[in-house]
Amino acid sequence: MFFYDATYIIVFPALLLAFYAQFKVKSTFNRYLRERAYVGLTGAQVARRMLDDHGLHNVAVETTGGYLGDHYDPGHKAVRLSPQVYNGTSLAAVGVAAHEVGHAVQHARNYMPLGLRTNLFPVASIGSQMAFPLFLVGFLFAWDTLMLVGIWFFIAALAFQLITLPVEFNASRRAMAYLTDAGYLNRAEAPKVKSVLSAAALTYVAAAAVAATQLIRLLVLRGSRRD
């Protein structure tokens, strides 16, 4: 997004989806943050039980700052939960906590897409920072090689976004299967927790869509500069 031009029409629908996804995840999370789960356990307690039931006694459950900052840290083997999830007994807290444990289970079971994402992260991180500056310099000075390098960097970033999708969907499936099979959700609660996880998943779909359309935009710009 280094300058505005007519090719933004390519990206605009994906940007609208991204804005909608952010609204959806926040509104759904906040809605079910106010609805207490019948089991009465905090997110931290659910996470600890799910980890132990999968034999992951060496994975810690910790609190972390930030709204919706919940994540699994594979390097330190820690499930880190935001205060609303760690201390909360809501449906949102239970679902998000179980989802993050789902990533810990993936790590322990050597889930291939997670391994690919972890290995791709350093390249994708560099790519996301360098792609646009390199492409811009190449575009301004009609240096096709530099534009191409920027495009390849961006492809690495897009690959990371795409491989994230099965990782997130699988973690949610693991979470829902555990919560329902272990009796932490009743029949009425399960669809509500699923809606929280589905809303979160939509943000990853939107991010991938934005990245894909940005790549198309770069290719169009490169083609126009070469003509």
Image (tube, grey):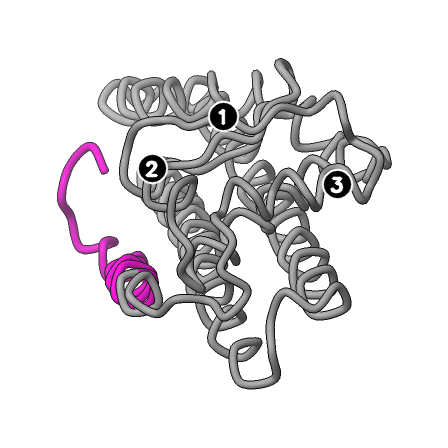
Residue at point 29%, 27% (across, down): 139
Would residue 161 be visible to someone looking at this image? Answer: yes
Instruction: Indicate the position of residue 89 as horizontal and vertical percent values.
Output: 42, 55
Residue farthest to the left? 4
- What residue type is disc 2 on? Pro
Q: Which residue is mark 2?
A: 83
Q: Give the residue type at disc 3.
A: Pro
Residue 132 shown left or right of residue 216 in the figure: left
Dot label at residue 45? none
Q: Is residue 133 above or below residue 81?
A: above
Establish if 142 lies above or below 180.
above
Asked if the magenta segment contains residue 65, the reply would be: no
Q: Residues within 10 Å of mark 2 (few under 14, many from 20)?
A: many
User: Marks 2 and 1, Cα distance to the nearest angstrom?
Assistant: 10 Å
Q: Position of residue 27 (x, y in %)?
A: 25, 66
Please tell me which of labels 3 and 2 falls first in the chain: 2
Please name the residue shown 28% across and 65% down the image: 34
Going by the image, does 3 lie left or right of 25? Answer: left
In the image, 2 versus 15, the foreground residue is 15
Quadrant for residue 66, please give it: top left
Residue occupied by mark 3 = 113
